[in-house]
Image (cartoon, coloured by chain):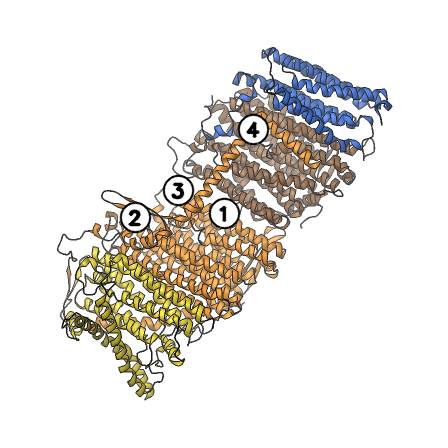
């Protein structure tokens, strides 16, 4: 069916999903951590909005709940925590430029195409208009993973991880109108705990290697295990 | 039902309790007691299932497949607790590597880990399963970095990130599964209940199931330690406290594999009528073989004793995945048995390794020498453990490998040479490291430590028993599980 | 119930006795005498039971089976005993009994050492139990369990004195090759089971895999059992492991364990695999000849007494497999009688080797015990210091040199007789190959004589080459009694081949469907009197008669007219022990002639010339393999580079690739 | 009558050989002397030597063990027994059954084993030297000899010497290439085994060149006598072997007195011819250096192998 034939709500959903995808790109490209956090918050907001709109479209209470959870968690709580960490670690000005921006974005684009190709068979027997959102969400997940691969900042990696979570949420919302409540809660709880732990780790890493550059976390590489001693334990 | 509660939620009770308990010495005992309670519950549960068959209620499902894993988990949890009490006391009081807060964290998280494991095994809801497995990561990740050394922190970070990512992929798979289910199920039905899904599996949309399975495989496979997703495993094993390594190898990997197999069952059923019926099995086989071969090579020229044995865990996980992938009653039976014996053997080995590292005061293999002179019990424990893990009869691992080879010889004869080659390389790698540690003259200034070899003796005795004669009840369970997974049994 | 019905119970009793011996040994940790008072007597009991069971099984030609409530639910352990097993039970008992008599004396010197007696006892018991289990197993699973138990226990025995680095190395090599062998055998059974649809030997016997799979099974069995039996090129563990173990264990390993491997091979190839192929025979003949020649050539160059014996074991097993090859060829060509003859030759050779090598290893143990060295270049003149051991060792050497009237000659003679029937074959290739094999055998025999002349002459004759040897002392009664028992066994095998072959004939009958004729008690005429005949008793009688006559006639007229004088020194300084021919010097000519067979390293310093004779298979086969493994390990390690981002990349790539595959 | 005669003959055969052995040695020596334009010792000298030695007291090295004194008797007995296996004038005598060629070689092996041990026993350099060289010789010569036997056994389908001779006599005389090779090999081996030029020199007095004599260096008196006699017997034995295997004509195939009586002079003639042949070869050849001996023996082994192969390829196929 053509886009025009869709009800307004669905059109809005598609638009928001597209913006979510764009936010994923932005997150990937954004080198300044502070800005990246903001982008991440926006992405969360978009996902929450999608959930809410679909709830409105389908009248499924479940979706409102997940929208609320997302809003609370991804838009408010986690960005706030990241902010605090940023300040405590004095990283506000910290930038984490990509090694090969052009290449990365190219790869990202390729991944989007791939995601669409993979999701096509999955989507094609779903009859709701929002089926292609599945492809988008898959793309967001993969882009999050890509971000974790290309970013050297631990904090950026966490953002990538959270972005993947967003993608998952998007998928759940778009394809299945949300998971059962208990699962939603469980996932949210896990994400929250994970975030707390991340915070703990930032501090630990910071005072162990005095930076958050994950590439410097490589003394366990087996080649070292082969030849030299690890430094004596305190 | 009460048995389930006793088995699963006793540890949950332990989490806050031990977190608040100030006295480390007492905490050790409490930890032990709770594990014992949980084991009692598990045994009761087992008896119940043995008598009344599959038990599914209140979102739990305990059938032949997971009941023996529940017992195993509770058992290993207990024996490891027995070991960890003196061990952690030594670390805390003698070595001063962990403070009082650390000890509280340790004991509380130990129970938390057990809880997640048991929950993951007993739940019927795939979503909860996911939550539990993720919870297991969260519970253990802080324990890996318990010693706060840079290496430990690094290991924990890798563990955290990689497993987090993997588990996220698994969630996507779960969502896809749910998505597929929703198109078959009437509204309101719980599309994540495994029982429900299994009932309607043949109608699930193959194309969706394939994608879902890939995500689930990669996701849970990361936790199983399938190559090339295994990188976190040696680090986490080698840097965490030894009891953690024992339960990680003995339990976590098993539970992850359990999840994968459950998903495979659904996928197989869904793909039965499609163009590629054996796809899930083939993927699993491929992963298993790759894992196995990579791991056996990595067993050579190791310097860190715990890394050595973590690679051996990877190797055996590969074998099990291969076995489940081959499918068919014989291979599946072998893989199920292998899960059991490997868990027992490997945890006993890690217990011994813990003592060995205390004797030699290092994890560097070339500095551990002449254990059999310094402390014969530890030396023999290590030697026999290694012999068992290398697949020498009359230990049980030989039995499962024997069956696995036989099954492969029937189904994929041309793959057997690879397996055999791998087993030989593994044996060589293990013994070329283990033999010098056990035999030879002891270096000066190496003294025996207070070691509790009871868990080791117990585990090895069980493995020996399984190698000589499998008890009827267990055989029955395994056979039921085989029926469940492959549709046909052996007995 | 009749005596025959007792066969299997007796065999089981033997196993139980061995296990009991293992079970009581831990007492030795507190109470050292437990070993000599409990463990070894129990082993002796096991030996007696095995002897009885073997004799009954052969005598009454019984075939009994039983099922144990152990093993897998659908695959319980099955036992059975038949003439073939009987032969090897006989061998096991015949060697184990002397060992159990000899053992206490030998183990006594470990008592105040640091090596735990308990380990020794437990491992020995399990080792014996494993070997018995292999002989009794009637299904592949129990067979493998017993087999690997045997390997594992003997591994512990090899690294019993583990403070010597070379013992540890030997143990490692041994364990590794044992594992390889075990897995290959497992595969062989796997093939047979896949064809027969069951792991019980009965099922395998019933089934007939197609030619390709049968050939694969044969190759796997040959490699697996051959590795354990020390066939070239899988023999390298043997000369390392046998010297490392305590001597009475070396005797068991060399005399019995290798035979157990032989048993397994016979069981699989001749019994389970069924259809004989001349191709198998040719393979066996070639491998056997190669092992025999290489084994004896290397034995010739050893300066360590026990290593020398170990290499000679390789040679003997080579001869056995050569004879098996002949049997296979004749069977395939439709001459069951000749096949039976060749098979008998092989079995008799195995029996003789068991007795002789048992005796020689016990003797070597006595030498080690008395002179505290195994190196020929430090021994000498022991015959005068340890006369009893010396004379018994001489008997062993004569037997190994295969001269009449000893038993070694009988089996060699039988093998020749079988080979000389090659003219009955029609295939041209075989007609050439078999005589060639006979030629190789002839060469081997001659060189074997050289090996043992050298060993005996250097170690027991001449003059002591070191202080410890000069003060060597005769060993105690138990150790002598052990050797004496073996000498008795050898005498029987040497002088009454007829009756013995009559017994072994039952096994030949079972495997080839025909038993050779004419095995009377005096004249041995395996084919027909016109063709060939051999009678050891008259030969011995005449020898003794002539000898006695000579002594009688030449008795000096007045008193004992034997004057003692210094040896001839060509008028220069009187010869010193250092001027004697050294072990290396004695074998120097052969070293020159057969140089290609050795990996030689000669170093000539100002005053001394040193030669190291290595085994080429190490250089050609094993070192490269080891390096390969390490290379691969380094490669795998490089993949584990330690960067979390790379790991994440792996995860992403895997995901994408899989998705691509399935879509 | 017949039985008694044949039994007597059976016992007679080895004794006859024993008696004739020194004569053959003396004959060879004599002919050699003549070829070198010397008068040489009378034929019976070897007998006199033996008698003299038996009379003398025996001196034994201090370093020697009891084996040293036992060895001569074993060597002598074994050689005699080996000789007893040879049919001298008839193939149908009782005791022909023990005439097994392989057993014969085995008995020679026994004799050599003890001889070499005795050589090593005194612990002198020369004994060891002789022993080592002897073993080198035999480790090629014995297989070659066995191969010769195999060649004939494959042709005549028996390893019984009498049987072989019978088969050769019974069949029509054919010219077999394998026999030529075998004969050549046998002669070369015989020369080597009996320690004759060019392998060894029985008459040498320089210790460094000795093989057989080197081992006997410590012996004296009756022991030496036994050893020497055994050596002479061995020479005769190889001569007889050549005769019986390759030119048995004249050997009685029935046990009647006439045939037996006829056999004897024929045999003497053949032996004399062989002795002459040996003498000539020893005169024209020079003793080769020890480390060239393996080459010589390998040639013998090769010839024997060729004999066997040419039998398999050329003759058996017919």
- On residue C372, the disc is 2
Per the image, label 2 sits on a secondary structure element best described as loop
Residues under numbered marks 4 and 3 in contact, where contact means CB atoms less than 8 Å apart: no
Q: In this view, does A14 lie above or below D262?
A: above
Instruction: Give me the chain that's brown.
Output: B
Say which chain is blue: A
Q: Distance between the residues labelled 2 and 3?
A: 18 Å
Identify the residue under disc 1: C179
Write down which chain is painted yellow: D
* Location of residue C392 by image quarter: bottom left
Q: Mark 4 points at which residue?
A: B29
Question: Color of chain C here?
Answer: orange
Is residue B263 visible in the rendered image? The answer is yes
Q: Nearer the viewer, residue C271 or C31?
A: C271
Ranked by sequence position, the earlier of labels 1 and 3 is 3
Q: Residue C162 carries which label?
A: 3
Instruction: Using a 10 Å C-alpha cutoff, classify the residue at mark 1 as few (fewer than 14 neighbours), some (14 to 19) or many (20 or more).
Output: many
Query: Between C328 and C545, which is closer to the camera in this rendering?
Result: C328
Q: Do pointers 4 and 3 mark residues of a single chain? A: no
């Amino acid at each position: 069916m053509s886009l025009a034939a869709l009800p307004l709500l669905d059109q809005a959903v598609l638009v928001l999903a597209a913006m979510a995808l764009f936010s994923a790109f932005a997150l990937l490209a954004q080198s300044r951590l502070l800005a990246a956090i903001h982008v991440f918050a926006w992405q969360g907001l978009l996902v929450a909005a999608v959930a809410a709109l679909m709830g409105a479209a389908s009248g499924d209470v479940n979706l409102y709940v997940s929208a609320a959870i997302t809003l609370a968690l991804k838009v408010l709580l986690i960005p706030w925590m990241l902010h605090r960490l940023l300040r405590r670690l004095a990283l506000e000005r910290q930038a984490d430029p990509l090694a090969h921006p052009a290449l990365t974005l190219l790869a990202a684009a390729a991944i989007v195409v791939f995601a669409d190709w993979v999701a096509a068979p999955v989507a094609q027997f779903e009859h709701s208009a929002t089926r292609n959102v599945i492809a988008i969400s898959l793309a967001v997940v993969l882009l999050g993973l890509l971000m974790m691969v290309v970013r050297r900042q631990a904090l950026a990696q966490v953002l990538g991880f959270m972005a993947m979570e967003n993608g998952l949420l998007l998928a759940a919302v778009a394809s299945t109108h949300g998971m059962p409540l208990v699962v939603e809660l469980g996932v949210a709880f896990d994400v929250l705990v994970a975030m707390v732990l991340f915070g703990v780790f930032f501090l630990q890493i910071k005072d162990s290697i005095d930076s958050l550059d994950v590439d410097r976390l490589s003394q366990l590489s087996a080649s070292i295990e082969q030849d030299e001693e690890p430094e004596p334990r305190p | 039902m009460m048995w389930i509660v006793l088995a699963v939620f006793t540890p949950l009770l332990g989490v806050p309790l031990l977190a608040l308990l100030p006295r480390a010495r007492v905490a050790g005992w409490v930890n032990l007691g709770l594990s014992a309670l949980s084991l009692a519950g598990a045994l009761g549960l087992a008896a119940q299932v043995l008598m009344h068959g599959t038990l599914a209620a209140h979102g739990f499902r305990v059938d032949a497949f997971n009941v023996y894993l529940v017992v195993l988990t509770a058992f290993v949890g207990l024996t490891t607790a027995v070991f960890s009490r003196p061990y952690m006391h030594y670390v805390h009081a003698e070595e001063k590597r962990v403070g009082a807060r650390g000890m509280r964290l340790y004991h509380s998280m130990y129970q938390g880990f057990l809880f997640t494991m048991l929950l993951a095994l007993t739940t019927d809801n795939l979503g909860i399963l996911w939550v539990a497995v993720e919870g297991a990561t969260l519970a253990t990740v802080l324990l890996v970095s318990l010693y706060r050394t840079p290496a430990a922190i690094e290991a924990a970070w890798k563990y955290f990130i990689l497993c987090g990512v993997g588990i996220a992929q698994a969630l996507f798979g779960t969502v896809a599964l749910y998505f597929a289910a929703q198109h078959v199920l009437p509204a309101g039905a719980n599309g994540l209940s495994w029982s429900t899904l299994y009932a309607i599996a043949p109608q699930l949309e193959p194309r969706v199931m394939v994608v879902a399975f890939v995500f689930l495989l990669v996701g849970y496979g990361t936790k199983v330690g399938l190559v090339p997703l295994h990188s976190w495993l040696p680090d986490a094993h080698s840097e965490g406290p030894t009891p953690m390594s024992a339960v990680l190898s003995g339990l976590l990997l098993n539970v992850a594999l359990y999840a994968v197999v459950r998903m495979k069952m659904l996928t197989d059923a869904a793909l039965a009528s499609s163009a590629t019926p054996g796809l899930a099995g083939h993927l699993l086989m491929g992963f298993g073989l790759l894992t196995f071969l990579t791991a056996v090579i990595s067993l050579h020229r190791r310097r860190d004793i715990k890394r050595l044995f973590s690679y051996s865990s990877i190797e055996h996980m590969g074998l099990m995945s291969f076995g489940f992938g081959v499918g068919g009653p014989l291979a599946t039976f072998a893989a199920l048995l292998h899960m059991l014996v490997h868990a027992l053997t490997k945890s006993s080995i890690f217990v011994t390794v813990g003592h060995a590292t205390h004797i030699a005061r290092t994890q560097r293999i070339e500095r551990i020498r002449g254990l059999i002179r310094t402390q014969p019990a530890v030396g023999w424990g290590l030697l026999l453990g290694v012999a068992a893990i290398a697949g020498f009869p009359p230990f049980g691992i030989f039995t499962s490998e024997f069956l696995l080879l036989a099954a492969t010889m029937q189904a994929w004869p041309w793959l057997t040479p690879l397996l055999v080659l791998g087993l030989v390389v593994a044996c060589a790698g293990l013994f070329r490291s283990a033999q010098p540690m056990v035999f030879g003259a002891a270096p000066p200034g190496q003294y025996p430590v207070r070691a509790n070899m009871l868990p080791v003796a117990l585990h090895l005795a069980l493995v020996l028993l399984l190698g000589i004669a499998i008890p009827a009840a267990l055989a029955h369970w395994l056979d039921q599980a085989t029926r469940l997974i492959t549709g046909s049994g052996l007995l | 119930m009749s005596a025959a019905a007792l066969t299997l119970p007796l065999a089981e009793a033997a196993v139980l006795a061995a296990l009991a011996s293992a079970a009581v040994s831990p007492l030795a940790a507190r109470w050292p005498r437990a070993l000599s008072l409990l463990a070894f007597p129990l082993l002796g009991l096991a030996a007696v039971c095995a002897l009885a069971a073997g004799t009954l099984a052969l005598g009454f030609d019984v075939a009994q089976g039983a099922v144990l409530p152990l093993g897998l639910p659908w695959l319980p352990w099955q036992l059975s005993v038949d003439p073939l097993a009987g032969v090897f039970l006989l061998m096991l008992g015949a060697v184990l009994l002397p060992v159990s008599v000899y053992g206490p004396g030998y183990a006594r010197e470990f008592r105040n050492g640091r090596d735990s007696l308990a380990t020794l006892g437990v491992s020995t018991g399990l080792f014996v139990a494993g070997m018995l289990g292999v002989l009794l197993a009637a299904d592949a699973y129990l067979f493998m369990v017993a087999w690997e138990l045997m390997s594992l226990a003997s591994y512990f025995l090899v690294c019993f004195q583990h403070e010597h680095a070379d013992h540890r190395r030997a143990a490692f090599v041994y364990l590794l090759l044992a594992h390889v062998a075990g897995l290959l055998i497992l595969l062989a059974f796997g093939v047979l089971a896949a064809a027969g649809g069951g792991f019980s030997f009965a099922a395998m016997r019933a089934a007939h895999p197609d030619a390709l799979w049968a050939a694969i099974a044969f190759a796997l069995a040959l490699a697996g059992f051959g590795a354990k039996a020390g066939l070239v090129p899988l023999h390298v563990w043997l000369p390392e492991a046998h010297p490392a173990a305590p001597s009475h264990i070396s005797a068991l390993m060399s005399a019995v364990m290798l035979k157990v491997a032989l048993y397994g091979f016979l069981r699989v190839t001749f019994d389970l695999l069924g259809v004989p192929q001349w191709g198998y025979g040719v393979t066996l003949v070639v491998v056997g000849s190669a092992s025999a020649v290489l084994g004896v050539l290397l034995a010739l160059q050893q300066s360590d007494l026990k290593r020398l014996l170990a290499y000679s074991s390789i040679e003997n097993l080579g001869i056995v497999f050569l004879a098996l090859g002949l049997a296979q060829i004749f069977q395939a060509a439709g001459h069951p009688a000749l096949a039976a003859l060749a098979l008998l030759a092989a079995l008799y050779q195995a029996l003789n080797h068991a007795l002789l090598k048992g005796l020689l290893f016990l003797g070597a143990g006595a030498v080690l015990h008395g002179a505290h060295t195994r190196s020929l270049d430090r021994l000498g003149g022991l015959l005068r210091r340890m006369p009893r051991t010396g004379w018994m060792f001489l008997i062993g050497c004569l037997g190994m040199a295969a001269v009449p009237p000893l038993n070694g000659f009988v089996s060699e003679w039988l093998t020749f007789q079988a080979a000389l029937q090659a003219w009955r074959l029609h295939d041209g290739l075989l007609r050439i190959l078999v005589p060639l094999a006979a030629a190789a055998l002839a060469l081997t025999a001659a060189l074997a004589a050289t090996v043992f002349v050298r060993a005996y002459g250097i170690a027991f004759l001449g003059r002591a080459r070191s202080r410890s040897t000069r003060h060597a002392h005769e060993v105690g009664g138990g150790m002598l009694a052990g050797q004496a028992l073996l000498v008795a066994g050898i005498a029987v095998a040497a002088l009454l081949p007829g009756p013995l072959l009559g017994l072994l004939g039952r096994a030949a009958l079972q495997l080839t469907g025909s038993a050779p004729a004419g095995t009377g008690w005096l004249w041995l005429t395996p084919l027909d009197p016109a063709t060939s005949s051999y009678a050891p008793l008259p030969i011995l009688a005449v020898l003794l008669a002539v000898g006695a006559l000579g002594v009688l006639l030449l008795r000096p007229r007045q008193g004992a007219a034997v004057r003692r004088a210094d040896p001839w020194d060509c008028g220069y300084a009187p010869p010193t022990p250092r001027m004697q021919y050294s072990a290396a010097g004695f074998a120097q000519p052969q070293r020159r002639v057969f140089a290609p067979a050795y990996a030689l390293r000669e170093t000539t310093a100002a005053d001394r010339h040193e030669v190291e004779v290595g085994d080429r298979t190490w250089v050609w086969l094993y070192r490269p393999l080891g390096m390969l493994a390490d290379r691969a390990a380094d490669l795998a390690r490089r993949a584990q580079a330690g960067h979390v981002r790379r790991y994440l990349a792996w995860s992403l790539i895997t995901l994408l690739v899989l998705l691509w595959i399935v879509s | 009558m017949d039985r008694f005669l044949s039994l007597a003959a059976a016992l007679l055969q080895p004794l006859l050989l024993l008696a004739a052995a020194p004569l053959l040695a003396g004959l060879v020596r004599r002919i050699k002397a003549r070829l070198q334009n010397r008068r040489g010792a009378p034929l019976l000298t070897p007998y006199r030597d033996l008698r003299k030695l038996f009379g003398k007291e025996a001196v034994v090295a201090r370093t020697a063990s009891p084996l040293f004194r036992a060895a001569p008797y074993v060597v002598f007995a074994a050689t005699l027994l080996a000789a007893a296996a040879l049919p001298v004038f008839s193939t149908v005598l009782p005791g022909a059954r023990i005439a097994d060629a392989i057993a014969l070689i085995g008995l020679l092996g026994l004799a050599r084993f003890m001889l070499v041990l005795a050589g090593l026993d005194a612990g002198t350099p020369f004994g060891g030297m002789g022993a080592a060289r002897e073993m080198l010789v035999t480790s090629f010569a014995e297989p070659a000899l066995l191969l010769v036997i195999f060649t004939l056994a494959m042709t005549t389908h028996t390893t019984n010497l009498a049987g072989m001779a019978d088969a050769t006599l019974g069949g029509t005389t054919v010219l077999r290439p394998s026999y030529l090779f075998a004969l050549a090999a046998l002669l070369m081996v015989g020369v080597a085994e009996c320690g004759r030029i060019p392998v060894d020199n029985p008459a040498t007095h320089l210790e460094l060149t000795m093989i057989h004599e080197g081992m006997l260096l410590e012996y004296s008196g009756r022991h030496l006598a036994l050893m020497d006699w055994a050596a002479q017997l061995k020479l005769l034995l190889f001569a007889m072997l050549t005769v019986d295997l390759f030119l048995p004509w004249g050997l009685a195939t029935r046990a009647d007195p006439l045939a037996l009586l006829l056999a004897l002079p024929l045999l003497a003639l053949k032996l004399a011819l062989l002795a002459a042949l040996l003498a000539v070869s020893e005169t024209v050849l020079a003793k080769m250096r020890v480390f060239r001996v393996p080459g010589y023996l390998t040639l013998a082994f090769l010839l024997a192998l060729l004999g066997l192969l040419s039998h398999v390829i050329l003759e058996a196929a017919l």
